[in-house]
Image (cartoon, rainbow, N blue to C red):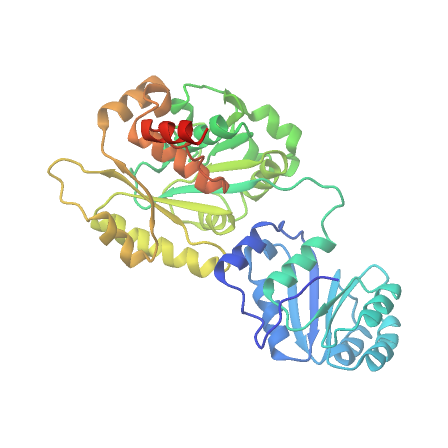
């Protein structure tokens, strides 16, 4: 029996608490869910959960009327994979109504009861009768998602890798360069496997930045989605460094790359089943598949330059993704190429203010170092480990993986040593 939040409203969790709870949840598989509610609050919580990106594969319908409406409905219709039933009845009356449901409910369907009485004996009797879970109202969308994920997650399955998507607010903003450097930094700092996928099929640069020329890559994965699994995906990867694998773009124009909205879903699903961190280099285009990738990523990094066109595009992207991902953090904002000589620029604070976010990082304009790294197929840290951008990449890697930056121990001063000697 789960410990549920209490209060007058099912929406009392802070943004931080909500995101922490949701970050730990796995996406829900392709299942059908129906709910029969008696109060508007519970119905709204289930509908809010249905709109979360983790439920994108599930088909959810919410009805009013409680258990009696469910009995009438399933007398002539098959039951779905999961049924939520809310009841305000007292325990004995609730158990009586469930008897009539048992006659019309398919044995393979799971049932979750949302009740209004905190009664341990009721919970035990419900589980004895085969009810999957009893939830105490009020419920929050995070509670609904947690129950669904728990009921349909394979026992002993490994956690899914996190999806980190980088995209530029404008073409040429440098999102790919930052994406590749941060992905490389994550693998180097933490020793965890990182899969970097270049999704810009016609013009991708990851193979150039890492000085690799693999014969296969992301194109083969996308065009063979029906047979894509971890084994097939592993054959397409090329190692770029310890713990870093690359799924390169072909960078050829021998065919058109027109995709449906779900074209990359199979690839991302396979990648996150076998890799703790999947870093996606998303091209600066706006169509069905790029929108789907950005909406379903765990974290989005928006890279922009400090000018008006970038600000307009960043505002549009930020607003669109906030609306599509209401239960997730807004995209992280990184300003790149700050301080170009003689170029009028928007100050970083003034750029971030209308977007309603704080800057994750700002990268100064340094064409010599970045150009040398790009032309030699190396990451910036391989050229200059103490460069300001290298330090920024380290901080971004820590922030995106949820790891705290290690604090250096304070240096012992001469006065401190003398005081220590006097104590002894």
From the viewer's perspective, tell me whether residue 234 is left or right of residue 136. Answer: left
Q: Position of residue 197 (x, y in %)?
A: 49, 33
Residue in view at x 55 percent, y 42 percent = 162
- Most foreground residue, 257 or 374: 374
- Most foreground residue, 168 or 409: 409
- Most foreground residue, 222 or 33: 33
Q: Is residue 394 above or below residue 38?
A: above
- Most foreground residue, 316 or 119: 119
Q: Is residue 257 visible?
A: no
From the viewer's perspective, tell me whether residue 284 is left or right of residue 91. Answer: left
Q: Position of residue 107 (x, y in %)?
A: 86, 62
Query: Quick one: quadrant of the N terminus?
Result: bottom right
From the viewer's perspective, tell me whether residue 276 is left or right of residue 186. Answer: right
Q: Is residue 192 visible?
A: yes
Residue in view at x 67 percent, y 73 percent = 137
Residue in view at x 42 percent, y 58 percent = 322
Label tally: 0
In terms of image quadrants, where is residue 136?
A: bottom right
In terms of image quadrants, where is residue 2?
A: bottom right
In terms of image quadrants, where is residue 285?
A: top left
Residue in view at x 65 percent, y 42 percent = 159
Q: Position of residue 69 (x, y in %)?
A: 75, 79
Q: Position of residue 198 (x, y in %)?
A: 45, 33
From the viewer's perspective, tell me whether residue 245 is left or right of residue 355. Answer: right
Q: Is residue 307 above or below residue 111?
A: above
């Amino acid at each position: 029996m789960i410990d549920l939040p209490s209060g007058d409203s099912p929406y009392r969790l802070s943004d931080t608490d909500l995101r922490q709870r949701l970050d730990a949840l796995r996406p829900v598989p392709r299942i059908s869910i129906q709910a029969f509610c008696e109060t508007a609050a519970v119905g709204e919580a289930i509908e809010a959960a249905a709109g979360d990106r983790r439920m994108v594969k599930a088909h959810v319908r919410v009805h009013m009327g409680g258990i009696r409406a469910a009995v009438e409905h399933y007398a002539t219709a098959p039951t779905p994979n999961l049924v939520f039933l809310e009841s305000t009845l007292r325990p004995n009356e609730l158990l009586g109504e469930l008897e009539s449901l048992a006659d019309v409910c398919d044995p393979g369907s799971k049932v979750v009861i949302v009740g209004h009485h905190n009664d341990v004996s009721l919970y035990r009797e419900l589980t004895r009768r085969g009810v999957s879970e009893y939830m105490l109202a009020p419920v929050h969308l995070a509670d609904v998602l947690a129950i669904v994920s728990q009921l349909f997650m394979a026992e002993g399955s490994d956690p899914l890798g996190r999806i980190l998507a980088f995209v530029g607010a404008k073409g040429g903003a440098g999102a790919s360069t930052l994406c590749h450097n941060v992905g490389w930094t994550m693998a180097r700092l933490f020793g965890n496997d990182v899969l970097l996928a270049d999704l810009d099929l016609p013009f991708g640069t990851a193979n150039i930045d890492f000085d690799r020329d693999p014969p296969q890559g992301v194109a083969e994965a996308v065009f063979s989605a029906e047979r894509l699994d971890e084994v097939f995906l592993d054959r397409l990867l090329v190692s770029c460094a310890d713990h870093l694998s690359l799924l390169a773009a072909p960078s050829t124009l021998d065919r058109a790359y027109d995709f449906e909205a779900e074209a990359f879903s199979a690839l991302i699903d396979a990648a996150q089943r076998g890799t703790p961190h999947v870093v996606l280099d998303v091209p600066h285009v706006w169509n069905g598949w790029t929108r789907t990738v950005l909406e379903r990523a765990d974290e989005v990094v928006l890279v922009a330059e400090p000018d008006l066109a970038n600000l307009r595009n960043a505002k549009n992207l930020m607003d669109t993704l906030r609306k599509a991902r209401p239960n997730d953090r807004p995209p992280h904002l990184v300003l790149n190429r700050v301080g170009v000589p003689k170029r009028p620029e928007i100050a970083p604070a003034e750029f971030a203010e209308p977007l309603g976010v704080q800057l994750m990082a700002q990268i100064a304009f340094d064409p010599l170092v970045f150009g040398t790294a790009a032309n030699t197929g190396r990451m910036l840290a391989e050229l200059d480990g103490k460069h300001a951008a290298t330090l920024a990449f380290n901080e971004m890697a820590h922030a995106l993986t949820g790891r705290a930056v290690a604090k250096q121990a304070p240096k012992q001063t001469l006065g401190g040593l003398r005081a220590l000697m006097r104590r002894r």
